[in-house]
Amino acid sequence: SQKIEQNSEALNIQEGKTATLTCNYTNYSPAYLQWYRQDPGRGPVFLLLIRENEKEKRKERLKVTFDTTLKQSLFHITASQPADSATYLCALIPSYKLIFGSGTRLLVRP
Amino acid sequence: GAGVSQSPRYKVAKRGQDVALRCDPISGHVSLFWYQQALGQGPEFLTYFQNEAQLDKSGLPSDRFFAERPEGSVSTLKIQRTQQEDSAVYLCASSLGQGSGTGELFFGEGSRLTVL
């Protein structure tokens, strides 16, 4: 069956460290993968898109990698800040619609 | 408006009542999606519109769920005879092009439905 897996346990890190979140998928062949941020009581907000032929994408303190052989994407936030605390969702685009993972909650301690 | 607008933000319904949730997408956006998000889970796809055409309704949980977008802009998600398992946040999202494409989806803040 098709699955998108994100770590269900919250990631708790110290301010200033790099946060690394993982998204694994099975039985999909997505052309694109996106990462979204969701704060409590709010809708998801788009962060980054990476294409299947791109290995890495950066935007300010954010970096995403996409390994179609391993069927895995890694999402990094460098020099993390308490304001980065949120749930991060990965989403695959196998065709025209987004399929979301369950999200990983990130807590950045001051 | 500047973003996707959803109303009501909160709705409490008694079991068996009908509810209607409204989505006002970004002006000019062709694609409109409805997602359902249970607590602690990611959004689950419900249905997709391209302009006024409902091209995919495969995610609607039962025939009690109905969505429309008659003029290709505002959309309404209707749930008839609500059940407790319908309690969730219903998210609407729009995008400029067809489908999710290579662009981002713009989400509304969601409508939180609680069925007692």
Image (cartoon, helix red, strand yellow):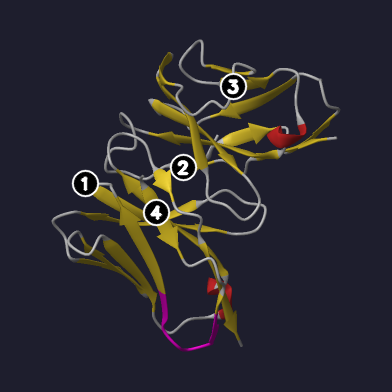
What numbered label is drawn on residue B106? 2
The stretch drawn in magenta includes residue B108: no
Magenta stretch bounds: A12-20
Among the two numbered marks 1 and 4 on one chain, the one whose residue lies closer to the N terminus = 4
* Residue B72 at x, y percent in the picture: 45, 16
Which element carries disc 1, helix, strand or loop? loop
The question of residue A15 being in magenta is answered with: yes
Which marked residue is nearer to the observer: mark 1 or mark 2? 1
Q: Is residue A41 above or below residue A76?
A: above
Which image quarter holds the N terminus of chain B? top right
Q: Are labels 3 and 4 on one chain?
A: no
Q: CA distance from mark 3 to mark 1?
A: 30 Å
* Distance (Cα) linking label 3 and label 4: 24 Å
Q: Earlier in the sequence, mark 3 or mark 2?
A: 3
Residue A31's label in the rendered image is 1
Q: Residues within 10 Å of mark 4 (few under 14, many from 20)?
A: many
Q: Please report contact status of discs 3 and 1: CB closer than 8 Å, yes or no.
A: no
- Mark 1 Cα-neighbour bin, 10 Å: few <14, some 14–19, many ≥20: some
Q: Is residue B85 left or right of residue A93?
A: right
Residue behind mark 3: B62
Q: Amino acid at mark 4?
A: Ile
Q: Chain of mark 3?
A: B
